[in-house]
Image (cartoon, helix red, strand yellow):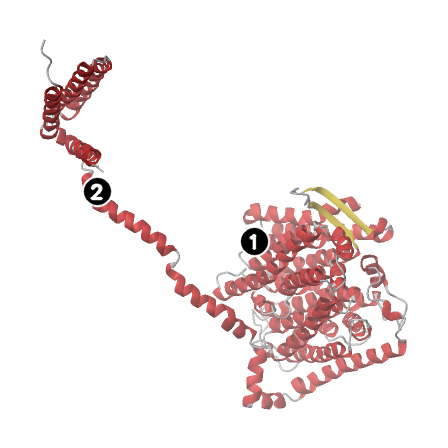
């Protein structure tokens, strides 16, 4: 199996991360923001996996499992929040919940 | 019985507490009974204790009752303890007994006042504090009483607080005496750091061991103590508050500003006499202050028109005599004059109060006149008081006490002919202004209208005090008259024969000549007052109508313009400074800092807009910047 060069996979992960960030910034729907966050997190995971296979060290793989765990926890909390929010104000527009401004 | 000493100050304090808590709901009769009764019981107890003290003297002629230890810090251990010796016995007797008579009188005098119970509550607190002052075994307890009477003086001068002038007078009295009290407090600090105790007997013992006579420490300590005494007793240069203190009700003037509180300075010096004996220069200063004050105040009293201000200036002048006596080492003569003065000056104030009461708050003697026939009892008692003040020879107590002071001012080691002459001149002016007051207010044509006559509750104290004023002098006769020296024998148990060395090197004939001089001078004063103010007042009017005469009159009327001097020197610069600093210059730095951050807060407030995406953008931007910094440096 021909190995993929490190630069390529890091570039892919950077691209994915930027896309996710862009999604977080431009999307107004909270569900989409959460999904974009997932993309960002997986981009980071990709960078870890690529680096670990490049140097042949298992640490990156372990870190990815952690990231998956964190992502699962984050999604469960996030979705619960989204549900609550929707029950209260009947919208998923993140700009509509700016009532806590200083 | 001596162990009941603690009850003496406690009884008036209980009276104060009861009146303070329940006084508003009581009838005036009950308030009067509690107010005067608590002091009366205290007086009775003092008399019983005094009788026992004299009949079977405790060891060392002193009885100390330690109640409890106040606190203990670094070896300094003041106790709540009362000490009864001859000096504090005389003071406490006068305070309680004269205090009781004045309380009794106040029931009649203040009867129509709406704040009847407040008056008696404050008067009771005063008596309690004064007793703490005189009975306190250490200077710290004395200081508690000292400030307590200052507070009561302030409250009672400003008793009719609806009148702004009264409040100003009260503040003036409080602030001016505070100047002296600050000096005194520093003096106490000095004594504690140097000698490690404030217990009076230890203090005098240790000072005698550790300080050389005339050493710098002794001079500094006594000077600072003298500052406190001068402020409280209305002596030069802090005498300006006392004439204004007459804004209070007349019984207050009688009790606080004549008989008891203003003599606290005399008591302080007598109490710490061993310290003053170690600093002869300061002791001489005491005599000089006394001599100057008695002359200055005597001159001012000559031209006053307000009967209470005349009496106020005469009080300053008589306390000047006491300072003169203390200054020449005649401790017991000073205390003797304190006692007779308490009787006759309280009498004069109360009689003047009866007149003021009868004429519906008229205090100008030129609007009185002819009162002798309308108020005979008041007239005769006032005349007795005036006779004592003017020291009419042989029959009045004032003669015996003042004569003793004049004799010691001449003959004792610290005395000199100049001090004696100052005292004699003061006696001459005293009898002129005293009888000016008698002649103008009580004789001549009636001018005022009598509104109500004083009842028995006011007249009985007058008669008792008149009796005391006449006869209290006979317990201490001059050496060349008869061997009756009960008072000084009693006082010698405290002062240990200070100022009695004169007996060997003085002759009875010389003393007789001086007595004759003093007696003639005071009689001439009375005659002068008769010719100048009763028989032919036109001459005085002629003099006072010339420019120089009217200037002098105004100058003396304003008390030698000390108020103007102090206003120019201290009050006005301070006020100007206060006006400049009205906006708090020092604070402007911190205010500036606060307003700067507040402005920054307003400028940056818009970024806290609550939009989650906006915060995320901020985070991302920050991360990019940080990354950039890490990469490119």
Chain letter behind tag 2: B
Quarter of the figure with residue B102: bottom right
What number of labels is visible? 2
Residue shown at 89%/79% (left/top)?
B509
Q: Which of the two labelled residues, at mark 1 and mark 2, occupies the earlier sequence position?
A: 1
Q: Give the alpha-carbon distance from disc 1 to disc 2, as whole Å.
A: 57 Å
Point out residue B412 in the picture as x, y percentages from the top left corner: 81, 71
Quarter of the C terminus of chain B within the rendering: top left
Chain letter behind tag 1: B
* Apparent side of residue B116 relative to residue B78 in the rendered image (left or right): left
Can I make out residue B36 in this image?
no
Q: Is residue B267 above or below residue B84?
A: below
Please identify, in this view, whether the residue under mark 1 or under mark 2 is nearer the observer: 2
The residue tagged 2 is B605
Mark 1 and mark 2 in contact? Answer it, CB < 8 Å: no
The residue tagged 1 is B118
């Amino acid at each position: 199996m021909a190995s993929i060069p490190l630069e390529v996979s890091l570039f892919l992960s950077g691209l994915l991360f930027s896309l996710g960030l862009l999604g977080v910034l431009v999307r107004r729907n909270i569900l989409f923001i959460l999904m974009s966050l997932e993309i960002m997190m997986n981009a980071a995971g990709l960078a870890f996996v690529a680096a670990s296979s490049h140097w042949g060290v298992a640490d990156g793989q372990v870190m990815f499992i952690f990231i998956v765990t964190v992502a699962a926890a984050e999604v469960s909390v996030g979705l619960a929040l989204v549900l609550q929010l929707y029950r209260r104000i009947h919208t998923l527009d993140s700009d509509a919940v700016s009532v806590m401004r200083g | 019985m001596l162990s009941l000493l603690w009850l003496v100050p406690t009884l008036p304090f209980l009276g104060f507490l009861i009146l303070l808590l329940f006084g508003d709901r009581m009838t005036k009769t009950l308030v009067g009974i509690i107010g005067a009764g608590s002091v009366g019981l205290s007086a009775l107890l003092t008399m019983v204790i005094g009788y026992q003290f004299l009949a079977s003297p405790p060891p060392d002629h002193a009885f100390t009752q330690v109640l409890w230890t106040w606190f203990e810090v670094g070896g300094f251990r003041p106790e709540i303890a009362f000490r009864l010796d001859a000096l504090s016995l005389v003071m406490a007797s006068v305070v309680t007994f004269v205090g009781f008579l004045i309380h009794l009188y106040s029931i009649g005098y203040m009867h129509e006042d709406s704040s009847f119970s407040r008056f008696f509550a404050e008067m009771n607190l005063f008596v309690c504090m004064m007793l703490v002052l005189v009975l306190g075994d250490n200077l710290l307890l004395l200081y508690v009483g000292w400030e307590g009477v200052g507070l009561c003086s302030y409250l009672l001068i400003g008793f009719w607080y609806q009148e702004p002038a009264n409040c100003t007078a009260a503040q003036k009295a409080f602030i001016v005496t505070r100047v002296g009290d600050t000096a005194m407090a520093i003096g106490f600090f000095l004594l504690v750091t140097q000698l490690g105790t404030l217990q009076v007997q230890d203090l005098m013992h240790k000072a005698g061991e550790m300080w050389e006579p005339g050493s710098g420490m002794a001079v500094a300590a006594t000077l600072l103590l003298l500052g406190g005494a001068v402020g409280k007793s209305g002596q030069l240069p802090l005498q300006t508050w006392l004439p204004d203190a007459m804004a209070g009700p007349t019984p207050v003037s009688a009790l606080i500003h004549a008989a008891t509180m203003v003599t606290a300075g005399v008591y302080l010096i007598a109490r710490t006499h061993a310290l003053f004996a170690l600093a002869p220069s300061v002791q001489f200063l005491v005599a000089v202050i006394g001599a100057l004050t008695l002359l200055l105040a005597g001159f001012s009293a000559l031209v006053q028109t307000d009967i209470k201000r005349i009496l106020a200036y005469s009080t300053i002048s008589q306390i000047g005599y006491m300072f003169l006596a203390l200054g020449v080492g005649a401790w017991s003569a000073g205390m003797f004059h304190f006692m007779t003065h308490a009787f006759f000056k309280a009498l004069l104030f109360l009689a003047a109060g009866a007149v003021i009461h009868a004429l519906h708050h008229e205090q100008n003697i030129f609007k009185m006149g002819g009162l002798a026939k309308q108020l005979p009892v008041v007239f005769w008692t006032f005349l007795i008081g005036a006779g004592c003040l003017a020291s009419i020879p042989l029959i009045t107590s004032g003669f015996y006490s003042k004569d003793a002071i004049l004799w010691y001012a001449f003959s004792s080691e610290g005395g000199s002919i100049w001090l004696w002459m100052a005292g004699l001149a003061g006696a001459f002016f005293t009898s002129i202004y005293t009888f000016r007051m008698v002649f103008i207010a009580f004789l001549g044509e009636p001018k005022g209208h009598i509104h109500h006559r004083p009842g028995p509750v006011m007249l009985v104290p007058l008669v008792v005090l008149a009796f005391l004023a006449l006869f209290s002098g006979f317990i201490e006769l001059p050496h060349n008259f008869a061997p009756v020296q009960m008072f000084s024998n009693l006082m010698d148990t405290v002062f240990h024969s200070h100022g009695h060395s004169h007996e060997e090197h003085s002759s009875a004939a010389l003393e007789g000549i001086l007595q004759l001089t003093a007696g003639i001078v005071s009689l001439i004063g009375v005659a002068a007052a008769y010719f100048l103010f009763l028989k032919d007042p036109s001459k005085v009017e002629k003099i006072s109508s010339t420019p120089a005469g009217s200037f002098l009159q105004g100058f003396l009327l304003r008390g030698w313009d000390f108020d103007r001097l102090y206003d120019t020197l201290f009050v006005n610069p301070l006020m100007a400074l206060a006006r400049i600093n009205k906006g708090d210059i020092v604070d402007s730095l911190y205010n500036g800092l606060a307003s700067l951050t507040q402005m920054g807060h307003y400028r940056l407030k818009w970024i806290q807009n609550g939009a989650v995406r906006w915060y995320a953008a901020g985070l991302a931007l920050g991360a990019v910047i940080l990354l950039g910094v890490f990469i490119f440096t």
